Image (spheres, helix red, strand yellow):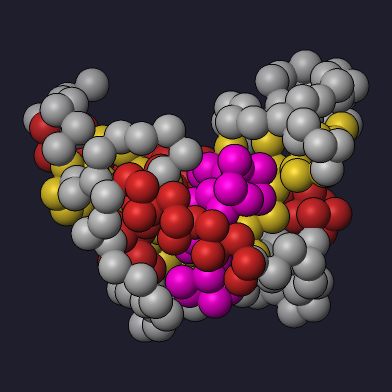
Amino acid sequence: MMQVHQFHRWDVTPRQAMQIQEELRAKVIARGSIKALRFIAGADAAFAKDAERIYVAVVVLRFPSLDIVDTVIHSEKVRFPYVPGLLSFREAPALLNAFGHIRHEPDLIFIDGHGFSHPRRAGIACHVGLLLDRPVVGCAKSLLIGNYDEPGPMRGATTDLIDGDGQVIGAVVRTRDRVRPVFVSVGHRIGLDQAVRLTLQCTKGFRLPEPTRQADLLAGLSKRDAEGDTR
């Protein structure tokens, strides 16, 4: 069972949540290199139609084969409102509960969301990384902040994601030929270059890296089963 290093409360106001993120920013280690990589986890969430319940999935894959070795699904009531930039306070409690039940502890975690590429440099990938004390990569499907030049059309093309002060806060990565890029950023205890390389190594012909792609599928299936959707 993975240990959660819980150093703040979850029952906070949005203003208090922003202050917590400012404190998290100082703790994030935006560097490091993973030497031995056996298991990689992916985590994602889906919300009920009324947005009052969250369904999360954690999938653990063996590296480099990317065969699935472990899956956990979990559901609970949503306790924090939707506020842009505060996604982790809405999703992380449920994700951490799911991580507490995996059998194969991952050497790296992919989160469907932003890490350092966040207004306070403390997106959900940073938050989860700090609470689990594990290397985490944020791989988001859409832009949150920053500016970038469009990468080349072929798989593997990348450009820098830059904030208003000219700081590199992530990378824009083409994971499939002529398909919209993803936004990769450091979550915790890994450098951006390796985060980009591993994102590409974990992509098997789809836009999303396999860990979060599988987690997305499982979370969505859990939600549909709970709501009686037979599609």
> Is residue 223 magenta-colored?
no
The image position of residue 103, as x and y in percent, is: 39, 78
Task: Identify the residue at image location x=44%, y=60%.
Answer: 20
Q: Quadrant of residue 229?
A: top left
Side (left or right) of 116 relative to 55: right
Residue 135: name its quadrant: bottom right
The quadrant of the picture occupied by the C terminus is: top left
Q: Residue at x 29, y 68 (%)?
A: 9
- The residue lying at 86 percent from left, 37 percent from top is 166
Whether residue 62 can be seen here: no
Q: Which one is nearer the viewer's eye here, 66 or 199?
A: 199
Residue 79 at least partly seen: yes
Height in image: 208 above or below 5? above
Q: Is residue 107 above or below residue 74?
A: below
Q: Nearer the viewer, residue 170 or 42?
A: 170
In this view, the residue in front, 5 or 96, is 5
